[in-house]
């Protein structure tokens, strides 16, 4: 039984694949077939899973774990989420402008005047780009775009994000643009 201190979601198991114990899984890694490169995967109930074989399928991977040898055992894993410890993720492979979602959670979002807009409580991608969920005391959660226009600087050491609240959609433009209709010349 393994209790994870700082878990990072790596995959969600779907249904069984075939008769030999393979499962379909949605991997949350840049390379889905690298799921086994991070060591043993763990479920929140304390079980550990070692990847024996992995192959890419359309939009997911087929995985065979040690000890899961038949369809019934594979079907029992349906819906299980698999995690690793954050410390097992390779930091040296990240570019300067790359971050793990897990590292962004808990950062405080502030503007250039020091006004806090809450802390990052989640990072989501619904298909149109990454979104950060911010939650402040007594405030409803809000989603802002995780883009260079909205998030100007990330300081993991200080635990803060420098944001542009206007670009993030958190405030209204103090000076809306003046509308001037085109003047067409009539002949």
Image (cartoon, rainbow, N blue to C red):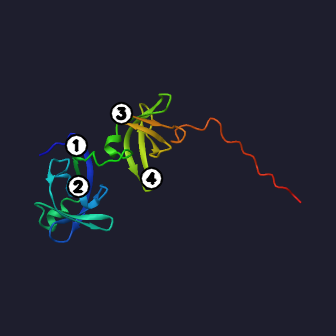
Tag 3 residue: 159
Q: Is residue 129 above or below residue 134?
A: below
Q: Nearer the viewer, mark 3 or mark 2?
A: 3
- Most extreme residue toward the top, as rendered? 114
Tag 4 residue: 129
Query: Does the residue at mark 1 contact the one at mark 2 (Cβ under 8 Å)?
Result: no
Q: Position of residue 76 (x, y in %)?
A: 18, 60
Q: If the image is split into quadrants, where does the C terminus sit?
A: bottom right
Q: Which secondary structure, mark 3? A: loop
Tag 1 residue: 87
Q: Is residue 48 above or below residue 102?
A: below
Which badge, 1 or 4, is on the more N-terminal residue?
A: 1
Question: Quick one: 124 or 182, which is closer to the camera?
Answer: 182
- Spatial separation of the CA atoms under disc 1 and disc 3: 18 Å
Say which residue appears at 35% left-offset and 45% top-offset.
99
Left or right: residue 105 compared with residue 139: left
Q: Nearer the viewer, mark 2 or mark 4?
A: 4
- Spatial separation of the CA atoms under disc 3 and disc 4: 23 Å
Marking on residue 80: 2
- Report crowding for label 3: few under 14, some 14 to 19, many 20 or more residues within 10 A (C-alpha): some
Q: Which secondary structure, mark 1? A: helix
- Most extreme residue toward the right, as rendered? 187
Q: Which secondary structure, mark 4? A: loop
Say which residue appears at 87% left-offset and 58% top-offset.
186
Which badge, 3 or 2, is on the more N-terminal residue?
A: 2
Q: Nearer the viewer, mark 1 or mark 4?
A: 1
């Amino acid at each position: 039984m393994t209790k994870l201190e700082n878990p990072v979601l790596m995959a969600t198991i779907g249904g069984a694949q075939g008769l030999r114990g393979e499962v379909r899984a949605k991997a949350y890694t840049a390379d889905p077939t690298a799921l086994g490169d991070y060591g043993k995967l763990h479920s929140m109930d304390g079980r550990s899973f070692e990847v024996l074989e992995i192959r890419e399928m359309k939009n997911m991977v087929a995985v065979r774990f040690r000890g899961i040898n038949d369809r019934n055992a594979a079907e029992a894993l349906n819906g299980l989420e698999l995690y690793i410890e954050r410390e097992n993720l390779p930091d040296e492979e990240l570019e300067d402008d790359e971050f793990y979602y897990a590292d962004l959670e808990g950062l405080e979002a502030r503007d250039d005047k020091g006004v806090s807009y809450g802390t990052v409580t989640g990072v989501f991608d619904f298909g149109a780009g990454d979104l950060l969920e911010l939650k402040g005391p007594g405030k409803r959660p809000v989603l802002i775009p995780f883009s260079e226009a909205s998030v100007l600087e990330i300081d993991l050491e200080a635990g803060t994000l420098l944001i542009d609240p206007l670009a993030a959609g958190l405030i209204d433009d103090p000076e809306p643009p003046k509308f001037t209709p085109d003047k067409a010349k009539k002949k």
